[in-house]
Image: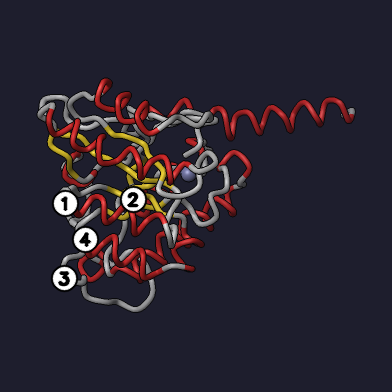
Amino acid sequence: MSWRALAVGAAGAWVAYAWGAHLFTAQCVRRGDARAPRIALTFDDGPDPVWTPRVLDLLAARDVRASFFVVGERAARAPDVVRSIARAGHDVGSHGWSHKSLWLAGPRATAVEIGRTHAFLSDLLGREPRHFRPPWGMVNLAMFPLLRRLGLSCVLWSIQPEGLRPVGPLEQSRYVVGHAHAGAIVDLHDAEGTPRAPERLSAALPQMTDGLRDAGWELTTLGELLGHGPRDRGKWGASKGPRRPPRSGAPRGTRGAPRFCARPGSPT
Ligand SMILES: [Zn+2]
């Protein structure tokens, strides 16, 4: 077999592993129940020791509960911030260990990205995450069976006010309010994203939440939007490691069929 044939074969295998996996993203959640006037705000890429607490304060001031997709290695550097998220009644989901694109991760690396974050968050919070959002919205064929085994649902989004380009706070809040729909999942960033994304998000958040509520939308967690109930480690025990009781005020957990959605190239 020629080198050229080998190269073509390897490229074909990668296309099937990475791009082909997107054929299965119909299994993933992009929105909740379209009959109820509820919307879930989701925050990616944290925890950030500066911006995440500010976002938590903004949400607390308006009695809004939301969902945070945290990056494992950042959570390990700021565990108290993750505990604060949970104590405030927000959902904590997994966004992988290092925010590595799953397009660039083989089966073993994919298992580390997802499994290590799952175990860490389960130990830290005393209950297992129920939602996983793949970094950049990119999936591979190894991801789906892993998520099924861990009881994780794939969650993408239906509204993203800021993609690859910076968008001002006023435009972001107008975009979200203008595109709001029943069961919407809004993708926001309390860390990373495009340059200074958390700063713009923090400036947009008050007007965004007020605007949504004024329009009659109830803001809730992903667990409640998707009808996923709590699952603490003591009851389910899928992960190994020390068991800890759920902390009082810990997030209402989540439950449900695995689903995932992707929009390759989006900064999530
Ligand atoms: Zn991300």
- Ligand 1 within 8 Å of disc 2? The answer is no
Q: At numbered mark 1, what does the secondary structure look like: helix, strand or loop?
A: loop
Reply above or below: 177 against 155: above
Mark 1 vs mark 3, foreground winner is 3
Residue assigned mark 1:
229
Question: Residue 238, position in %: x, y?
Answer: 32, 64
Q: At numbered mark 3, what does the secondary structure look like: helix, strand or loop?
A: loop
Q: Amino acid at mark 4?
A: Ala
> Of callouts 1 and 4, which one flags the residue occurring earlier in the amino acid sequence?
4
Q: Quadrant of residue 79?
A: bottom left
Q: Residue at x 24, y 43 (%)?
A: 222
Q: CA distance from mark 1 to mark 4?
A: 17 Å
Mark 2 vs mark 4, foreground winner is 4
Q: Quadrant of residue 9?
A: top right
Residue assigned mark 2:
68
Mark 4 vs mark 3, foreground winner is 4
Q: Amino acid at mark 2?
A: Phe
Is residue 143 visible from the viewing direction of this image? Answer: no
Residue assigned mark 3:
248
> Of callouts 4 and 3, which one flags the residue occurring earlier in the amino acid sequence?
4
Is residue 221 visible from the viewing direction of this image? Answer: yes
Q: Are marks 2 and 3 in contact (CB under 8 Å)?
A: no
Mark 1 vs mark 2, foreground winner is 2
Residue assigned mark 4:
88
Q: Residue at x 51, y 38 (%)?
A: 136
Reply above or below: 164 against 43: above
> Of callouts 2 and 3, which one flags the residue occurring earlier in the amino acid sequence?
2
How packed mark 4 is, by other alpha carbons closer than 10 Å (few <14, some 14-19, many 20 or more), is some
> Of callouts 1 and 2, which one flags the residue occurring earlier in the amino acid sequence?
2
Tell me if 42 is positioned left or right of 60 in this view: right
Q: Nearer the viewer, residue 170 or 216?
A: 170
How packed mark 2 is, by other alpha carbons closer than 10 Å (few <14, some 14-19, many 20 or more), is many
